[in-house]
Image (tube, coloured by chain):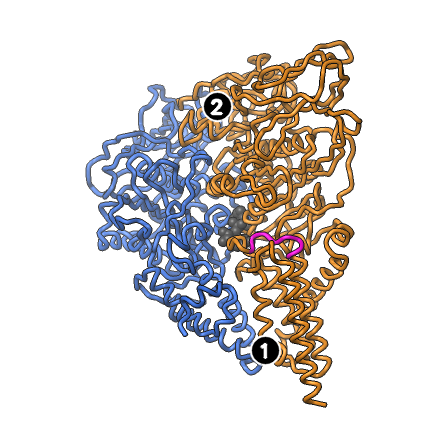
Chain colours: A orange, B blue
Amino acid sequence: MQPGRKFILKVKVMEAVSKECGIINRISGPVVGVSGLEEVRLHDMVWVGDAKLVGEVIRMSGTQATIQVYEETSGLKIGEPIWGTGHPLIAHLGPGLMGQIFDGLQRPLNKLAEVEGNFLQRGVSENSLSQDKKWQFTPLVKEGDHVQAGNILGEVPETQSIMHRILVPPNLTGRIVEVKAGDLTIAEPIVIIEDDQRKINTINMEQIWPVRTPRPYKRRLDLAEPLVTGKRVIDMFFPIPKGGSAIIPGGFGTGKTVIQQSLARWSDVDVVVYVGCGERGNEMAEVLMELPELEDRVKGIPLINRTVLIANTSNMPVAAREASIYLGITIAEYYRDMGYDVLMLADSTSRWGEALREVSGRLEEIPGEEGYPAYLSSRLAEFYERAGHVDCLGNGEDKPYAGHREGSVSLVGAVSPPGGDFSDPITQSSMRITGVFWALDYELSRKRHFPAINWIKSFSLVDLSRWFGDNIEEDFPKLVQEAKSILGRENELLQVVQLIGQEALSDMEREILNISKLLREDFLQQSSIQDIDAFSSLEKSYWMLKVILEYHKKTQEALAAGIELNAITNLPVLQRIARMKEIDVEKAVPELKRLIGKIDDDLTSLISNWETENA
Amino acid sequence: MPEKLLNTKLATKEYRTLSQIKGPLVFVERVADVAYDEMVQIIDPDGNPRVGRVLEIDGDMAIIQMFLGTEGLDISRTGVRFSGDVVRLKVSPSMLGRILNGMGEPIDGGPDIVPEKLEDINGSPINPAVRNEPKEFIQTGVSTIDGLNSLARGQKLPIFSGSGLPGNELAAQIASQARVLSDEKKGDEPFAVVFAAIGITHRESSFFIEHFRSSGALDRTVVFLNHADDPTIERIMTPRAALTTAEYLAYTHDLHVLVILTDMTNYCEALRELSVAREELPGRRGYPGYMYSDLASLYERAGRIKGKKGSVTQLILLSMPDDDITHPIPDLTGYITEGQIVLGRGLHQKGVFPPVDVLPSLSRLMKEAIGKGHTREDHQSVADQIYSFYAEGRELEKLVAIIGEASLTEQDQRILNFSKRFEQEFINQGTENRSIEQTLALAWELLSMFPKEYLKRIPEDMIEKYYKG
Ligand SMILES: Nc1ncnc2c1ncn2[C@@H]1O[C@H](COP(=O)(O)OP(=O)(O)OP(=O)(O)O)[C@@H](O)[C@H]1O
Ligand SMILES: [Mg+2]
């Protein structure tokens, strides 16, 4: 039989209770039927067969249960045993997450490569987090302090950019009896707490959490601040707030992954969790290779220091796609609870939905739309609801370990609808839940208009205009509105042109077409490949838009004065507008302001010359 | 018929407990100790063995999928033996130069393959952490690919063809011209071709074999042939056998392997047939819901691995049913592969060869494989600029068809002219083998039809350097 690799039992948490408790009686791909299961609850994690594959109980009736196996089941036999672990699928949380790449079951892929070589084997368990590495723990509590869930026990510099805060686990309050400090491993006790029932709790730096359960917080806060992404079309037209959620639907090759990768690079958040769910291996390799080299714009620290990668590529076991999404969001919430702004990217949620469909099909459940199970939309809703801007547990007191602390999880999910058709159930359900919709357009991507975000179909339901007005420029919201309506007008005019040609249009109307072209080509288009324009600050974006709209205003004035459109578009200043993107972000504002001055001067003198000539 | 390349170590116990035969599936009752996915041998009433694998086990009943169909089997006289192992392919470097059937048995009259190793035909997923990014530019000699949709070593790139379109001709041309540029010792790196014919005609397969022979590549090629008149269900195996061989040659024998899979549409149809026989809930257009994962388990077997000299590059051919790119076969393929080369019927009808429609075509690994140090500094921006003009040109063409040329501006006129020349000179290269320098020079010649200030996608210093004024 296929040699089930020897299971290296190193995971210490709770596994000690595991015991043999059932027998396999049916195998169909990733779905396994088991009889004689006792003392196992729905959603418990189990080990399947002699190879000890990781599985989860997804249905129970009497003593017959159905298990979804997160690993390849090839070689499994009827009659092999099942072991219960006594707990649901969990994430291991603690210092050492940052900069790692895990699979959907949180196995450290770099470590696995050392142990088992280039190809993934089954049933091999490595600790998610290094048990030997020493971390410098500085306590914020002292003996006798009364602490409650979410208070900060102490801090560990995890990477150059992340101060890892070890928190009192949810549901625990009590008095500190003992505190350690200094270089410790995550397996060693750091604090001992006597809880209100006088029970002794030993806390170490590694904590676990069931991935399907949202982590608690004190309360939700308003979404009032944008998550700045550096992409003009997003930041200016369809912004996402910190703590919000967005989807990027689009057919193949329309740019979902490129957008997500650039969000991972440029977003102004503290932590990024990037989940490759059922997508390409090379894309994960690309992220993995470039993050150590790319630096954070503000801090100048390599981005790998703030990123956690989860890779469950399309050729890895299907059921584990689900695990990878939940693992990602749990890690994101964990850092949120420390008071960080976290961005979780999921590429692609459709592959997760398809895994649900496949397992549901094997369970012979009654299919809903397109064969997806009826619970698809509630699963999606539960997932996106885990985004949010929150007041963290255990904050708000005047104590060193309980100071003010807010955190956020923003979620951006790619959606890959069949045939690029947005009527697909995953796109539709996700769209109803999330407030931000970046619709990628096949036609735009064919023309290499990137990011191929369609400005007519996309939307952002969260109103951030107040923040932009207060923090950038007062007329920011007005300017954006004007640009959008020009583009809307273009759409109408183009329909006319298609029927009867440009000649039917007035100069004023043709000018609208010209300005729209500038908006599209010189503002909205922003290549992620050419470095110079990959990131645009809010200020640069605002002033670029201002330039175009100033030019528009002045042109309209000139037209009103009776000058012909051609005379205006022949002005050389137009070439400078076309090169705005190439201006360095740092120097953009003064240069763009000068350009506006130049536009004013050139057009004003054009008008006055014309008036003198025609006087 | 003995399966010469498959491992045939078998249990001695033979079951004669068939209860049902349905399409390619055989149901066996009262079996014990059967493993999911293990290889099975079925002995037909004439005593000839055939190979299958376990698809599902329910209590003491096993469902077996037969690779060569179930014709001639019956309930009472058919025997079943389990192998205790997954389906494995016997692999060896001596497969090079050989012609095998779709399951890997020699059909060229030569000797049996003496195995060096037995490999699981399903392979194992490459750990994403050990993948090396493909970034070596492969010059195919075809301008629309090299210039605008460059191929990198370790990439998986499909050609979306249609009935009557010359997809195979283009693939053969690429296979014989492909070479890596950045290397000093150009050309003398050890390479191999693994060619898998999946349900294609004898005429098509002889075309390829002839092509390999005349370019002298045949003795570096392993040929797997499943023809249109061979059993459909064997097609499930053919690409797996081919990729298992490719991985073995690449990672054990350090060869740069180019795998050609043609035609994956036939593979997908075999998959659908199997799914129907299993009475699974059909997905879009009757294809199974798991087709994405199934195709991914094949296509993801391309790549480069850190520390390994060899590589696996895939050139995948498929015909779009009804020229429909949203059909599940091209759609799911495009969602997995690293771009696609799309052939256009319009261009083909205009007599353009190769009729590559560049607008829907894409190579996702291009940006890593081109530019300074790979091809040339201006490569990306030249490609961007060409795309932008040509896309506009195609739109203008449509417009002109309705309202005539009268209302066109001077720039519109230029764009239209550019589009025409681009199709006739750049795309329509015939069988000429162009170097990347030639391709870029031609691109600049066409771009220089425009005044410099219109080349907005190209940095000014590069315009100064390459513009042909
Ligand atoms: N913002 C961008 N700037 C420049 N090029 C882009 C941009 N977005 C996409 N592209 C181009 O389009 C290609 C495809 O993009 P991407 O891989 O993100 O598509 P996708 O939507 O994720 O497709 P799939 O669903 O198949 O994964 C890229 O390789 C790149 O060439
Ligand atoms: Mg993608």
Please determine whether, in this image, residue A447 is positioned above or below residue A100. Answer: below
Give the number of the mark in front: 1 or 2: 1
Please determine whether, in this image, residue A261 is positioned above or below residue A604. Answer: above
- Left or right? Give the position of A197 relative to B168: right
Query: Reading the chain from its start, which is encountered first: label 1 or label 2?
Result: 2
Q: Which chain carries label 2?
A: A
Read off the residue under disc 2. Answer: A123
Please determine whether, in this image, residue A230 is positioned above or below residue B427. Answer: above
Can you give x and y, in whole percent of width and height, for residue B102 in the image? 33, 41
Query: The residue under label 1 is which amino acid type?
Result: Asn
Label 1 to label 2, Cα distance in Å? 69 Å
Image quadrant occupied by the N terminus of chain A: top left
Counting every numbered tag in the picture gives: 2
Read off the residue under disc 1. Answer: A570
Task: Report the magenta residues as a range.
Answer: A533-540
* Callout 2 crowding tier (Cα within 10 Å): few <14, some 14–19, many ≥20: many
